[in-house]
Image (cartoon, rainbow, N blue to C red):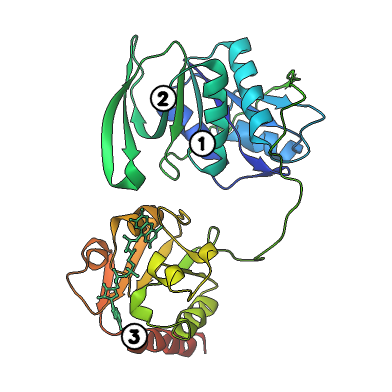
C-alpha cells in the first residue's frame, strides 16, 4: 500500500497538523509513505518526517513557491500522484489541506472523501466514515476510484514515531503561468506568542459572560495559566470579541490540553470546534447544559464568582 501525503508547512515551519497526514497514511496501513513538501524546508523538517513514518520525502521546487499557493500546491500534488501512482493521496482537512486536495481532485478528475474519521482499504471501493454538516452528522460512505483521495478530519490521526530516516527526492512540477493567482503575498500579525490555535489551555466565554468587560475575568485566568481566550458565536455576533477568537464550525477548530467553557451552552456548532480538546471543564449555571453533560469536569455556578475563585487559588499556590 503506497500513500502520498501532503505535508503542510508555513514558510518552512511544519504546520501543527502536518504530521497528521502521515498519521492518516499509517491508519490506512501504508507500507510506503511518500511525503510531499512544496517549497523549501530545512533538514530538521525532513528528519522529523522520516522519524514519524515518511519513507520518502519529495521536495517540490518551483520559482512560484514563494509562499502558500493552493493552486500550485494542488497542481504539484496531482502531478506527483500521476507520476508515482499511489493507492491513496491524503491531506489534513484543515483550511489549507482541504483546499489543496480539492484542487488536486479537480485536476485529476477524481472523487474526494473529505473530513474522514476512518477508512478501510480493500480491493474495491473503500468504506469510509466521515464528518458532515460541521460535525452534526457522521456518514458511512464508499469511495470508489482508481486512486483514493482522502482528507482526514483534523486532530483525529496522530503519526506514530518509527525512528526512520527518509531519502529525499526532488520534483519540479510544470505549472501553468496562471497558477499562483491566489498566492499569499503579505501578512499582518494579529497575535504573537500564545495564540488560540496553539495554546495548551483555552479559557472560552459565551453569552453567560454577559458583556465585553466580563471577559476581563477570562483574560486574568488565561494569563495565569499562559493560555488564550476564545469565545462562542453569540459573543462575536454581539461584538464583544473579534471573530478571530471564535471557536466552532464557523470559527477556529482547536485541540488544547484543557478547554474551559465559561457560560457556553455547548451547541453542536460550537462543540465541533473544540471537541478535540483533551479535557473540558464547563462552568455553567445550568447543570443540564450540553457542555456540562459532555464535559470531563463541571462547576455549576455563576462564572463571575467561579473564575475569580479559581484565579485566586492559582495565585495562592504560585505564592
Ligand atoms: P447560549 O446558547 O445562549 O448559552 C449560554 C450559556 O451560558 C447557557 O448554558 C447558560 O446556562 C450559561 N450562563 C448564563 N449565565 C451564566 C453565568 N453567569 N455563569 C455561568 N453560566 C451562565 N456557535 C459557535 O460558538 N461557534 C460557531 O462557529 C458557530 N457556528 C454556527 C454556524 C451555523 C450555521 C449556525 C446555525 C450556528 C452557529 N453557531 C456557532 C451558533 C450556535 O448554534 C449557538 O447559538 C451558540 O454557540 C450559542 O452560544 P453560547 O453558548 O454562548 O450561548
- Badge 2: residue crowd in 10 Å (few <14, some 14–19, many ≥20): some
For the residue pair 49 and 239, the one nearer the viewer reads as 239
Q: Quadrant of ligand 1?
A: bottom left
Q: Is mark 1 within 8 Å of ligand 1?
A: no
Q: Quadrant of residue 179?
A: top right
Camera-near label (3 vs 1) is 1
**Residue beneath label 3, please?**
306
Of 115 and 314, the residue lying toward us: 115
Asked if residue 3 is positioned above or below residue 181 in the image, the reply reads above
Q: Please indicate whether residue 63 sits to the left or right of residue 93 in the image.
A: right
Q: Residue at x 35, y 75 (%)?
A: 207
Q: Which residue is mark 1?
A: 98
Other-residue count near label 3 (Cα within 10 Å), few / some / many at <14 / 14–19 / ≥20:
some
Give the Cα distance between marks 2 and 1. 18 Å
At mark 1, the secondary structure is helix
Mark 3 CB in 8 Å range of ligand 1? yes
Tell me the tag on residue 254: none
User: Which residue appears at 46% of the width and 90% of the height?
Assistant: 316
Residue 56 shows up from this direction = no
The residue identified by callout 2 is 28
In the displayed structure, does residue 192 sit left or right of residue 116?
A: right
Q: Nearer the viewer, mark 2 or mark 3?
A: 3
Amino acid at each position: 500500500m503506497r500513500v502520498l501525503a501532503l505535508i503542510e508547512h508555513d514558510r518552512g515551519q511544519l504546520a501543527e497538523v502536518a504530521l497528521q497526514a502521515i498519521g492518516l497514511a499509517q491508519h490506512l496501513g501504508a507500507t510506503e509513505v511518500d511525503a510531499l513538501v512544496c517549497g523549501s524546508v530545512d533538514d530538521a523538517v525532513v528528519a522529523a518526517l522520516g522519524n514519524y513514518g515518511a519513507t520518502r520525502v519529495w521536495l517540490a521546487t518551483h520559482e512560484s513557491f514563494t509562499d502558500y499557493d493552493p493552486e500550485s500546491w494542488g497542481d504539484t500534488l496531482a502531478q506527483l500522484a500521476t507520476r508515482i501512482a499511489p493507492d491513496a493521496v491524503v491531506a489534513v482537512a484543515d483550511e489549507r489541506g482541504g483546499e489543496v486536495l480539492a484542487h488536486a481532485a479537480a485536476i485529476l478528475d477524481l472523487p474526494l472523501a473529505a473530513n474522514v474519521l476512518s477508512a478501510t482499504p480493500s480491493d474495491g471501493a473503500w468504506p469510509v466514515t466521515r464528518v458532515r454538516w460541521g460535525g452534526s452528522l457522521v456518514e458511512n460512505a464508499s469511495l470508489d476510484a482508481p486512486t483514493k483521495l482522502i482528507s482526514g478530519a483534523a486532530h483525529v490521526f496522530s503519526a506514530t514515531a518509527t525512528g526512520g530516516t527518509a531519502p529525499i527526492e526532488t520534483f519540479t512540477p510544470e505549472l501553468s503561468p496562471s497558477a499562483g493567482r491566489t498566492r499569499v503575498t503579505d501578512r499582518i500579525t494579529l497575535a504573537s506568542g500564545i495564540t488560540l490555535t496553539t495554546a495548551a489551555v483555552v479559557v472560552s466565554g459565551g453569552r453567560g459572560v454577559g458583556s465585553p468587560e466580563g471577559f476581563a475575568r477570562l483574560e486574568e485566568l488565561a494569563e495565569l495559566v499562559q493560555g488564550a481566550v476564545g469565545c462562542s458565536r453569540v459573543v462575536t455576533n454581539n461584538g464583544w470579541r473579534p471573530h478571530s477568537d471564535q471557536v466552532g464550525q464557523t470559527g477556529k477548530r482547536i485541540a488544547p490540553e484543557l478547554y474551559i467553557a465559561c457560560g457556553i451552552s455547548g451547541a453542536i456548532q460550537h462543540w465541533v470546534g473544540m471537541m478535540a480538546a483533551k479535557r473540558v471543564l464547563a462552568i455553567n449555571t445550568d447543570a443540564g447544559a450540553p457542555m456540562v453533560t459532555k464535559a470531563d469536569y463541571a462547576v455549576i455556578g455563576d462564572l463571575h464568582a467561579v473564575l475569580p475563585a479559581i484565579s485566586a487559588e492559582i495565585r495562592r499556590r504560585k505564592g
